[in-house]
Image (cartoon, coloured by chain):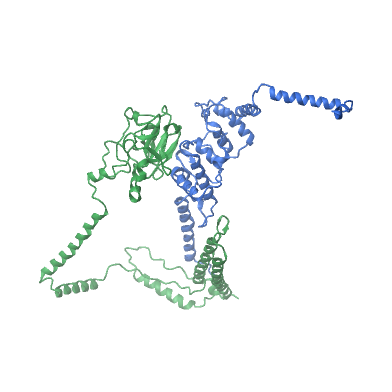
Chain colours: A green, B blue
Amino acid sequence: MTDLTPRNSGHEVDDQAQQRSELETVRDVERYPVPDPGLPEHLPRLSDVDEKAADRATRQVATMFGLVPVLAILFVVIYFAVPRDAVFLGQNAKNIGLGITAGLALMLIGIGAVQWGRQLMDDHEMVDHRHGAASTKEDVEYVLRELDAGTDESGIRRRKVLGYSLGGALAALGLPLIVSFADLGPWPTKRVRAATIEETIWKEGIRLVHDVTYEPIKASEMVIGQLVNAQPENLQEFHGTEYLQEKAKASIIIVRMDPNDIKIPEERRDWQVGGILCYSKICTHVGCPISLWEQQTHHLLCPCHQSTFDLGDSGLVVFGPAARALPQLPITTDAEGYLVARDGFSVPVGPSYFERDSRGDFKGE
Amino acid sequence: MRFLSSRRRHPAAKALLLVLGLFVMGSLYAVLAPAGQSSADTGTSQQVEEGRALFAVGCSSCHGLNGEGQSSGEIQGPPLAGVGAASVEFQVGTGRMPMARPEAQAPVKQNRYTPEEVAALAAFVATLGPGPEIPDPSQYDPAGLSEEEIARGGELFRTNCSACHNFEGAGGALPGGKYAPSLYGVSNQHIYEALITGPQQMPVFSDGVLKPEDKRAIIAYLNTLHEQPSQGGLELGGLGPVSEGLWGWIVGIGGLSAIAVWIAAKGTKAK
């Protein structure tokens, strides 16, 4: 028993005809030479004409809503019944259970509401016309008139000193704001830079020690292809913020390569010990720590932006956005055969900044 | 003596006397004979010969008949003098060697050699030059380490290994088709061997510099890490923002788009 006449068709058809005629009257022939085709013909939905289809949709929506309390109760049961450390398919069973029940419950409410709107709520098209964003001429004139009257009534035109003093008061309030910016850090003058970001705790005779364990490193224990993430021995004297600041600048990597396979410039002959070379661990691009070293190609790759440095060629950049070679730390051995710094870094380590003097950087031979 | 003399004509006496004589001679020989090669050493040199034969079949096309390597031509292989038994156990034991074809990096595949054959190959390559030996299980067995030591292993792992192998050992990419393999499912022995031999692009972490107990702590940390269940559901390989972003953009936003299309779609009409 299918009744093909929509249940409330008469009213809707009238509406549409009226809307269409409205659109026709506002049509600007010059700007829109092609007439607006208007809304497509309104066709009733299955649930509009078939009471059975409507009942079916009602059942679907009610079932979805009806499942929500079940899931909510299940959530509470899982919350209390499942132990905290239970494992299901390699994952935490409790979290999985809580997530699935709560998520499914919310999703069923959403899908049910959408299905309700699509199948059962009244189905008629509406038109909202667009209007220009500007106010009408009358509105603009009215506002300007009111503003003018208000200014007159305030007396600021007659007693100008009021306006000037208020302006001065507001401007002066900016001063404390600007001055308090000074608390963001020391003013980065040349002298301050030289004593902070351009200075590391490396100096002559400081032992190179393992990061984490602080074990000194014997040159004879380094084999070809070895990589060590290291720190200066005196880093242990620092604590808290200072420790982090110094570690961020002083971190190094030590590598040993076959001296016959690499290029060592004449002026850096005595910066290394039999192919053991030491470089800053901080990328010269934006300062990520790098220790991703390929022992066969001697390339050191920064994981942040793929800058690549050739440690077999004084740390020159071979790829990527870094502009400067990786600073090399001159090293030697002490009387007991442990690796020590011959001197501090000859150039500032770490990322580039505007005022940095790059004349001392190694640029290849 | 009466017991013996009264039975000297017993039918079994001759045979027993012969056995006794042979036993005495054998014992005397064992005690007095010049101490030559010990039996263990005999076994080893036999093992080396076996290894040489296996090497000639499986390895020599790239590494040369005596492990001298070849550096020209399409098929190249590094010289093997001094790589040590640990290197062979790692490369062959994980199926990386022999390689199926020349490529950027040797992938892990099924190992077709029996443990005895791997040991024979390792013994042969070890004779080419001194190198790292196969570690003893006591060096890499993490049993009995305290929680503090395991946590220290984590610190060492994040300092020395995570740059390439990812913060939970899920592996990562390197330039030119190379990669740092995932550490999931890698045996403790193979991790230790990789550390002391530095296979392919991996740097060496020799026992003299990274102490054996530090290596053991790193292995213990990895075991602990990989045994933990995933608390937050699907880990997406533990790769961080890449896989999570991919999931969010494709599955998350894609799903939302699909629902938006469904909400706005015109359903079935009556005619």
Residue A320 to residue A27: above or below: above
Does residue A161 appear in the picture of this structure? yes
In the picture, measured across the screen, residue B174 lies left or right of residue B62, that is left
Residue A67 to residue B70: above or below: below
Which residue lies at the image location 72% right of the left edge and 24% below the top edge? Answer: B28
Residue A147 to residue B256: above or below: below
Residue A314 sits in quarter: top left
The residue lying furthest to the top in this view is B34
Residue A321 to residue A178: above or below: above
Which quadrant of the rendered structure holds the C terminus of chain A?
top left
The residue lying furthest to the front in this view is B2
Please tell me which residue lies in front, B153 or A83.
B153
**Residue A157, x across and y down, in percent:** 12, 70
In the picture, measured across the screen, residue A171 lies left or right of residue B195, that is left
In the picture, measured across the screen, residue B102 lies left or right of residue A39, that is right
Please tell me which residue lies in front, B133 or B158.
B133
Residue A149 sits in quarter: bottom left
Please tell me which residue lies in front, B124 or B263.
B124
Q: How many marks are shown on the rendered structure?
A: 0
**Residue A323, x across and y down, in percent:** 32, 39
**Residue A266, x across and y down, in percent:** 33, 27
Which quadrant of the rendered structure holds the N terminus of chain A?
bottom right
Does residue A321 appear in the picture of this structure? no
Please tell me which residue lies in front, A276 or A7.
A276
**Residue A161, x across and y down, in percent:** 11, 68
Which residue lies at the image location 60% right of the left edge and 40% below the top edge? Answer: B110
